[in-house]
Amino acid sequence: MKKQSTEFFLSEIKRLKAEKNAIILAHYYQTGDIQDIADFIGDSLALSQKAASNSADIILFAGVKFMAETAKILAPEKKVLLPDMNAGCSLADSCKAVDFELFIKNNPGRTVVSYVNTTAEIKALSDIICTSSNAVQIVESLPAKEKIIFAPDRNLGNYVLNKTGRDIIIWNGTCHVHEEFSLEAILKLKRENPDSKIIVHPECELPVRMVADYIGSTSALLSYTGKDSAKCYIVATEVGIIHQMIKENPHKTYIPAPPRDSTCACSECSYMKLITIEKIYYTLLNEEPEIFVDKSILLKAQKPIRRMMEISEKLGL
Ligand code: 13P
Ligand code: SF4
């Protein structure tokens, strides 16, 4: 079979989107070509907000499975497509519903705050969801006497605990990208570029967070580089965000923070990178793979996500 050109895929995606009233929502960790064809690019919070309010019949999610599931939970009447069902998440995988249920049972009387990077089943077991954009504010919105379970990211949980001083016990999960940054390599880069600033995602380990000039979610890092006066940044999060940083502020320099294992492309999320332009085309054409969420799980998971969105809206996040 003849291999089609990139131009063919791009123009067919455009045509199919219009014909089917479909939109493409893409996370900042997608490759630059996908970010450039998306109707909307954002971090986890912004993508959930967009999924909940748009007039499309089909949402094609260029991201990972928990994000597409969140879109389906928020817009159950829409068809939600994910171009590769293997686009999972090491963090979401680290928290299985059967184990989490037991964890909650063994720690009774605590409010369960779960990060959006979880399966629909974990969300259904939670009282409120958060993203890295609003985790601190979500925890602060709970009455001071409430004791908390935070899952699944131990680094984000530790960041929230340090910021809020609340009584929090934390699930022991991590992200294979954010956990892997090398403190030594970051400090070496800083010595070589003394005027640079180190910007860090809160999913990174404490030693890396401790040397940060700024800590924030993907979109917070992007807007920081826009407002801040430095000319060079060492970026400790998934490299995909650098595409937007260059687009928005091309006169600045962005250096990806290196992983501990210098032979691997660990600062790339291998799950995010499973999505390609070609797969997006075939997914739109065939309207599959489609995301389905069991109805009773969907209804239970809706409540904690909506609770987060109401608080975020109130706080203008
Ligand atoms: P944000 O999109 O909230 O920055 O989260 C980062 C992440 O790891 C998404 O998988
Ligand atoms: Fe999951 Fe980490 Fe990839 Fe985000 S970057 S999707 S947390 S594995």
Image (tube, rainbow, N blue to C red):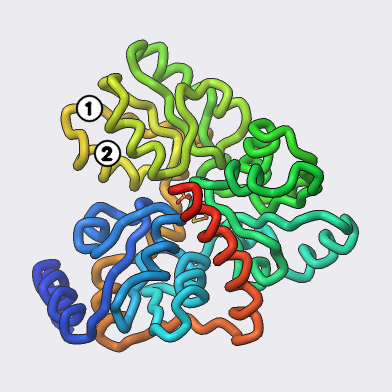
Is residue 17 or residue 85 the one in the foreground? 17
Q: Earlier in the sequence, mark 1 or mark 2?
A: 2
Taking the view exactly as shown, the residue that stands out farthest to the front is: 314
Residue 142 x, y percent position in the rendering: 69, 49
Q: Residues within 10 Å of mark 1 (few under 14, many from 20)?
A: some
| Residue 237 visible, this angle | yes
Callout 1–callout 2 Cβ contact below 8 Å: yes
What is the quadrant of residue 44 in the picture? Answer: bottom left
Residue 128 x, y percent position in the rendering: 65, 60
Residue at the image point whose x is 42% and y is 70% from the top: 52
What is the quadrant of residue 235 in the picture? Answer: top left
Query: Which amino acid type is shown beneath numbered disc 1?
Result: Lys
Is residue 210 or residue 142 the one in the foreground? 142
What whole-number distance in Å separates the C-alpha atoms at marks 1 and 2? 8 Å
Q: Which residue is mark 1?
A: 252
- Mark 2 secondary-structure assignment: helix
Q: Which residue is mark 2?
A: 245
What is the quadrant of residue 249 in the picture? Answer: top left
- Mark 1 secondary-structure assignment: loop
Q: Is residue 243 left or right of residue 153?
A: left
Label at residue 64: none
Q: Residues within 10 Å of mark 2 (few under 14, many from 20)?
A: many
Residue at the image point whose x is 43% and y is 86% from the top: 77
Ligand 1 closer than 8 Å to the CB at disc 2? no
